Amino acid sequence: MFNTLGLVIMYEPRVKPEQLRYAERRSWMLHRQLASHLDDETFAVWKPTLLGNIEWMRQANKGEPHLGNIDRWEALILAGDIEGLRRAMLDPTRDGQEMREVGPFVGLLPDEERRAVLAGVSR
């Protein structure tokens, strides 16, 4: 309905960091930083690394929900679904946390940014 009016509804999940355990908060903040870079251009650059990381994650992980979540990441990447990737990266629910546990974004965040994010995560 809103689309026909020329309106776009933007959804940005809000997470209260105190509701997440330290490891979950750290993962969410790193993925949030990565998501801030994600656009068509960076996706094109990142895609080969993402797909390579998917294969590595498949070898390194066994069982559910990990393998199913790796398949979900792969489907989003192959579809070029940048908004879907961003939603999965920022999802504050348990499902989002489990997705981030096997996120294929290893090695994409510059080390300086990674250190800055980690320095801002309180225990």
Image (tube, grey):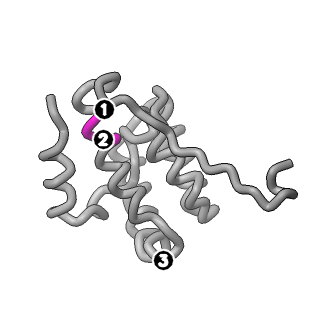
Q: Work out whether residue 2 or residue 69 is closer to the camera in this orientation and state it.
A: 2
Numbered-mark total: 3
Residue 90 percent coordinates (x, y): 45, 43
Residue type beneath disc 3:
Glu
Q: Is residue 78 above or below residue 21?
A: below
The image quadrant that residue 7 belongs to is: bottom right
In space, the residues marked 1 and 3 are separated at their CA atoms by 28 Å
Point out the tag, 2 or 3, that comes first from the N-terminus: 2
Q: Horizontal placement of 114 versus 9: left or right?
A: left
Question: Viewed as shown, does residue 4 lie left or right of 77?
Answer: right
> Any mark on residue 8, and which?
none
- The residue at which mark 2 appears reads as 27
Which residue in the protein does label 1 denote? 24
In the structure shown, which secondary structural element does the residue marked by tag 1 occupy? Answer: helix
Q: Main secondary structure of the magenta part?
A: helix
Indicate the position of residue 88 as horizontal and vertical percent values: 51, 45
Say few, some or many: other residues with alpha carbon within 10 Å of mark 1 (under 14 / 14 to 19 / 20 or more).
some
Q: In which quadrant of the rendered image does the C terminus lie? A: top left
Residue at the disc numbered 3? 41
Q: Is residue 26 magenta?
A: yes
Q: In front: 37, or 94?
A: 37
**Start and end of the magenta stretch?**
24-28
Q: Secondary structure at mark 3?
A: helix
| Residue drawn at (40%, 48%) of the image | 103
Q: Residue at x 61, y 50 (%)?
A: 10
Task: Check contact, mark 1 vs mark 2: CB within 8 A.
Answer: yes
Question: Label 1 sits on what residue type?
Answer: Glu
Secondary structure beneath dot 2 equals helix
Q: Distance from label 2 to label 3 (Cα)?
A: 24 Å
Residue at the (50%, 31%) spot, across then down: 95
Instruction: Give, as a three-letter code, the residue at label 2.
Output: Ser
How many angstroms separate mark 1 from mark 2 (CA)?
5 Å
